[in-house]
Structure formats: structure tokens, C-alpha cells
Image: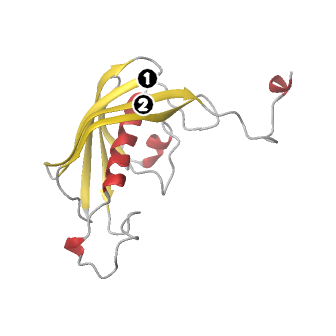
Amino acid sequence: MNTTAPVTSVIPHRPPALLVDRVAEVEPGRRLIAHRSVGAAAPGFHALDGGAARDERTYPLGMLLESWAQAAVLLACWERPNPDVLAGSVALLAGVRDARAIAPVAPGSLLVHEVRMVRDLGDTVITAGGSTVAGRPVLEVGQLTLALRPAPARAAGAETTTDERS
């Protein structure tokens, strides 16, 4: 897998909210490795002071954790893809424990997210792992729990099919 298209066929995230570029490896139900290129134009750097030197700018921690969490959703949903938030199940963040930022992530970095399945309970998935840049750890996630829940009902006034009307 080398393009964004397969990622968006599994999860509903779309740019600019999509924070995973590609899946490098996947063993469904066991582990996944995903990549994210953190360019200087990446969302999050825009909010930084334009006067900051390039080596003083770092990828926001919230976006780093969100990018890793999206890789976790990819693993959780790999065998049950749902690219549509109006159908099927959506993955909701249920909790994060023991997440720790280890080092800053600079513009131009390639994040490598490693996610492993701790437990799959069907409608709840527990994952763990971390992220590296050039082999150097930048994030550890002791546990991230996802709740897979039915998609919200269609908005009022949305088109319905004949079956939905009966």
C-alpha cells in the first residue's frame, strides 16, 4: 500500500483531518505500521509563530497523538472497513493511558507509527505502541481504547430509501 486511497477506503478521515499517509505493513488483528510525512506546511505548523526558526518548530503533541490514533483505527477496522461515517460502525476514542511524548518532531520528519492489538472485544478494541522518527522514539502509547459504535442516524431531512420509510 503506497497511496492515500487505500487508507480512505478503511477509515472516514479525509484531508486535512487525515493524518496518516500510508500503511507500510499490516497483519490484520495483530499489528500495523503506518507512515506520516510531517512537512513544514502540515496542519499545526500554520498556527506557530512565523518568526520561529525552523529548528525551533515542532509538530503539536495533539496532532502526533491523533496521527498515531488514526493508525490504531486502521488496525482496528482493517477487516471491517467503514469509509462512511453515516453507515456501519464508527471508531470513537474511549480512552488513552500511559501516553508519553519522548522527543519533539521537526518539520520534514517521517513518522513511523507502530500499533499492536492488545485485545479485540468486537465492539471495543485495545491497542498499544508508539512512533519513531529515523529510528528514534518520539511517542509511546501504553494503551489506546477504541469503541466501535453504530454510525449516528441520518440528519433530519436526509434522503431515505423505500426500505427506510416502511
Q: In the image, residue 108 lies at what x, y percent? A: 26, 64
Type of the residue with mark 1 = Thr
Residue occupying image coordinates x 42% and y 31%: 146
Instruction: Work out which residue is located at the far top of the displayed protein and give it.
Output: 121
Residue that numbered label 2 is attached to: 146
In this rendering, the answer to whether 26 lies above or below 140 is above
Q: How many marks?
A: 2
In this rendering, the answer to whether 24 lies above or below 102 is above
Q: Is residue 165 left or right of residue 23?
A: right
Q: In the image, residue 159 lies at what x, y percent? A: 81, 39
In this rendering, the answer to whether 43 lies above or below 30 is below
Residue occupying image coordinates x 82% and y 42%: 157
Q: Quadrant of the N terminus?
A: top left
Q: Circle 1 — which element?
A: strand
Question: Which of the 4 image quarters holds residue 45?
Answer: bottom left
Of callouts 1 and 2, the N-terminal one: 1
Residue occupying image coordinates x 33% and y 47%: 65
For the residues labelled 1 and 2, the Cα–Cα distance comes to 6 Å
* Number of residues whose C-alpha sits closer than 10 Å to that of mark 1, classed few (under 14), some (14–19) or many (20 or more): some
Residue that numbered label 1 is attached to: 124
Residue occupying image coordinates x 45% and y 18%: 122
Type of the residue with mark 2 = Leu
Q: Is residue 24 left or right of residue 140?
A: right
Q: Observer-nearest residue: 81 or 76? A: 76
Q: In the image, residue 123 lies at what x, y percent? A: 48, 21
* Number of residues whose C-alpha sits closer than 10 Å to that of mark 2, classed few (under 14), some (14–19) or many (20 or more): many
In this rendering, the answer to whether 130 lies above or below 133 is above
Q: Is residue 116 left or right of residue 10?
A: left
Instruction: Work out which residue is located at the far left of the displayed protein and give it.
Output: 136
Q: Are marks 1 and 2 in contact (CB under 8 Å)?
A: yes
Q: Observer-nearest residue: 49 or 77? A: 49
Question: Which of the 4 image quarters holds residue 107?
Answer: bottom left
